[in-house]
Image: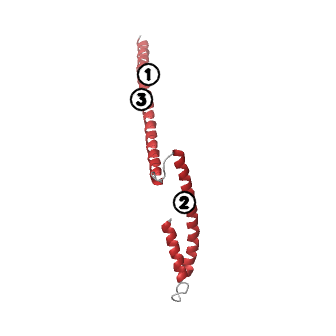
Amino acid sequence: MRQINAAMKNLETDLQNNKVPQCDADQFCEVMGKFAIACRQQVDVLGKMQVQMEKLFNDLCEYFVFDPIKYTMQDFFTDIKSFKDAFVHVHQEIIRLREEEKRKSRMQKAHKQSPRGQQRKLALVDIDAA
């Protein structure tokens, strides 16, 4: 944010210093003036968002009881992302294992029913033969 604000200040200084066109086709002040106005508005919005983000992060620090100086925002969100990724991976693994168990139980049921069906067929064949 400091770099963005410094760049904006430099642009505004350049616009103040170059009010007089260098030549007839010089449109620096017109074009960059419009850009500077739009950019300043966006930088102000970003600044407000950064203040809000820092406030919310400090609330998280208080809630989870850690020092924001020792445990930075980047470290915190990296750990949260790692946890989420691991959680999703394990969840998918559990779903896969459950489906595999269901498949095995269906196979076992089919295998158990298969000899019964064969015995019935043999019994029908014996009745027909008699």
Which mark, residue 42?
none
The colouring scheme, among rainbow, by chain, secondary structure or one colour, is secondary structure
The residue beneath circle 1 is 113
CB within 8 Å, label 2 to label 1: no
Q: Position of residue 4 (x, y in %)?
A: 50, 68
Residue 88 or residue 123, whichever sits in front: 88
Q: Earlier in the sequence, mark 2 or mark 1?
A: 2
- For mark 3, give the secondary structure: helix
Q: Residue drawn 55% across and 84% down?
A: 19
Can you give x and y, in whole percent of width and height, for residue 20 in the image? 55, 87
Q: How many marks?
A: 3
Q: Nearer the viewer, mark 2 or mark 1?
A: 2
Residue closer to the observer: 3 or 70: 70
- Measuring 54% from the left and 80% from the top, which residue is drawn there? 15
Quadrant containing the C terminus in the rendered view? top left
Are discs 2 and 3 less than 8 Å apart at CB?
no
SS class of the residue under badge 1? helix
Q: Quadrant of residue 31?
A: bottom right
Q: Residues within 10 Å of mark 3 (few under 14, many from 20)?
A: few
Q: CA distance from mark 2 to mark 1?
A: 66 Å
Q: Amino acid at mark 2?
A: Gln
Return the disc, 2 or 3, that comes first in the chain's sequence: 2
Q: Residues within 10 Å of mark 2 (few under 14, many from 20)?
A: few
Q: Which residue is mark 3?
A: 104
Q: Position of residue 34 (x, y in %)?
A: 58, 76
Which residue lies at the image location 43% right of the left edge and 31% below the top edge?
101
The residue where tag 2 is placed is 50
The answer for how far apart the CA atoms under marks 3 and 1 are is 14 Å
As measured in the structure, the alpha-carbon distance from the residue carrying label 2 to the one carrying label 3 is 54 Å
* Relative height, residue 83 to residue 46 (above, below): above
